[in-house]
């Protein structure tokens, strides 16, 4: 399965002059950490999905890029899926997951049984870690937050829950980055 690293956002909540994917966590741009995790996993090919909001990221990444209009995550993902190099199912990963590692990626690939897959984490874990919860939903009576890792495919949607700090830390704010640096292992 191929992977799309979604890295075309502006990162305005980070209060940083640079592009969000290039924000350093322990001295290394987040996007580099995510790409390295994917390349060390069973993923076959990695593509960076970039936009006009992230020209430095497009020049920086050491993998093929897919240019989108930068009209938001859903629109950019749709444009990336229309790229002739991409076929479903495809793993999508947000560039703001600096704790991601190959084992976690491979665990998600192992859990995938077809269709589309949303990987979520309990909001209580994010709160316990001290990271922001920007979006949540209730699934089977539990309040969950999307992790930024999904599989897009044909067929029914499934949600899996992972109580895993490597998936719970999305860096959207400076405080989130501080937590990520404390948790690096």
Image (cartoon, rainbow, N blue to C red):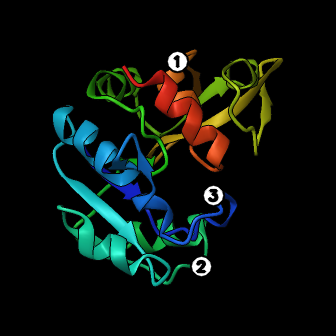
- Whichever of labels 3 and 1 marks the residue nearer the N terminus, that label is 3
Q: Which mark is residue 56?
A: none
Residue 146 lies, with reference to residue 60, above or below; the image says: above
* Residue 71's disc number: 2
Q: Position of residue 151 (x, y in %)?
A: 44, 42
| Residue designated by label 1 | 164
- Between the C-alphas of marks 1 and 2, the distance is 30 Å
The disc, 1 or 2, on the residue closer to the chain's N-terminal end is 2
Q: Residue at x 48, y 41 (%)?
A: 150
Secondary structure category for the residue under label 1: loop
Residue at position x 43%, y 75% from top? 54
What distance separates the C-alpha of mark 2 from that of mark 3?
Answer: 19 Å
Classed neighbour count for the residue bearing mark 3: other residues with Cα under 10 Å, few (<14), some (14–19), many (≥20):
some
Residue 52: percent from left, percent from top: 46, 84
In the displayed structure image, the side of residue 34 where residue 70 appears, left or right: right
- Looking at marks 2 and 3 on the same chain, the residue that comes earlier in the sequence is marked by 3
Residue that label 3 marks: 14
Q: Nearer the viewer, mark 1 or mark 2?
A: 1
- Quadrant in which residue 141 is drawn: top right
Relative height, residue 168 to residue 86 (above, below): above
- Camera-side residue of 22 and 120: 22
Q: Position of residue 120 (x, y in %)?
A: 61, 29
Q: Position of residue 130 (x, y in %)?
A: 70, 27
Q: Secondary structure at mark 2?
A: loop
Residue shown at the point (66%, 40%) measured from the top left: 175
Between label 3 and label 1, give the one nearer the viewer.
Answer: 3
Badge 1, how many Cα within 10 Å: few under 14, some, many 20+? some
């Amino acid at each position: 399965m191929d992977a799309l690293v979604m890295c075309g956002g502006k990162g305005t909540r980070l209060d940083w002059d640079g592009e969000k994917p290039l924000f350093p966590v322990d001295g290394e741009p987040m996007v580099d950490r995510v790409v390295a995790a994917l390349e060390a996993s069973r993923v076959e090919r990695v593509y960076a999905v970039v936009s006009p909001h992230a020209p430095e990221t497009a020049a920086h990444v050491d993998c093929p890029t897919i240019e989108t209009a930068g009209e938001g995550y859903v629109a950019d993902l749709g444009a990336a899926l229309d790229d002739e190099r991409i076929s479903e199912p495809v793993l999508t990963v947000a560039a703001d997951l600096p704790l991601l590692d190959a084992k976690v990626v491979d665990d998600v690939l192992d859990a995938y049984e077809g269709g589309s897959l949303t990987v979520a984490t309990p909001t209580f874990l994010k709160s316990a870690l001290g990271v922001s919860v920007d979006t949540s939903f209730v699934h089977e009576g539990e309040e969950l937050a999307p992790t930024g890792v999904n599989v897009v495919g044909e067929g029914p949607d499934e949600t899996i829950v992972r109580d895993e700090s490597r998936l719970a830390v999305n860096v959207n704010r400076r405080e989130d980055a501080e937590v990520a640096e404390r948790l690096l292992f």
